[in-house]
Amino acid sequence: MNALKALMIVAFAEAISWLGLLLGMVLKYGFDDERGVSLMGPIHGMLFLVFVGLLLITQYQERWSVGRTILSFIESIPPFTGFLLGKRLLDDVRRKEAGRSGTA
């Protein structure tokens, strides 16, 4: 698996974990139940760190510009925009795989 495909998978997973963390925050501050944040906080944090590492690897392998890398990083921060990033990366993966099968 190449870095671009791994980044796409982690981007979607990180976006889902963001939603889980938001739900955990609702439980924590709305219902005084910290279990959701205790569970989703570390999961989301680890996925975010993996995302950042894969983003840098992908920048190198795919020869992305600094601007595209920074934009991708920024897109990963607000809730829900991670899904847009994941969709864009999915399109990139499909385009790259189509180009590879077209030349083989």
Image: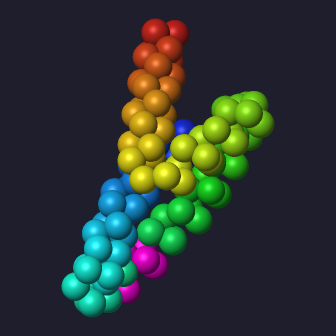
- Residue 95 percent across, percent down from the top left: 47, 19
Which residue is farthest front? 30
Relative height, residue 73 to residue 87 (above, below): below
State yes or no: residue 81 in magenta: no
* Residue displayed at 51% across by 71% down: 46
**Is residue 104 rendered to the left or right of residue 74?**
left
Up/down of 52 relative to 91, above or below = below
Expressed as whole percent of the image width and height from the top left, the position of residue 12 reads 39, 49
User: Which residue is rendered at x = 32% and y = 82% of the image?
Assistant: 29
Q: What's the magenta bit mostly, secondary-structure-wise?
A: helix
Q: Residue furthest right?
A: 66
User: Is any part of residue 36 visible from this angle?
Assistant: no
- Residue at position x 67%, y 33% from top? 68
- Horizontal side, residue 70 vs residue 18: left or right: right
Is 50 placed left or right of 35 in the picture? right
Residue 71 in view here? yes
Q: Based on the picture, tell me whether residue 40 belongs to the magenta stretch.
A: yes
* Colour scheme in use: rainbow
Q: Residue at x 60, y 41 (%)?
A: 72
Compare residues 7 and 20 and report the one nearer the observer: 20
The magenta segment: 38-43
Q: Nearer the viewer, residue 66 or 102?
A: 66
As drawn, which residue projects farthest toward the top?
102
Task: Answer above or below: position of 24 versus 79.
Answer: below
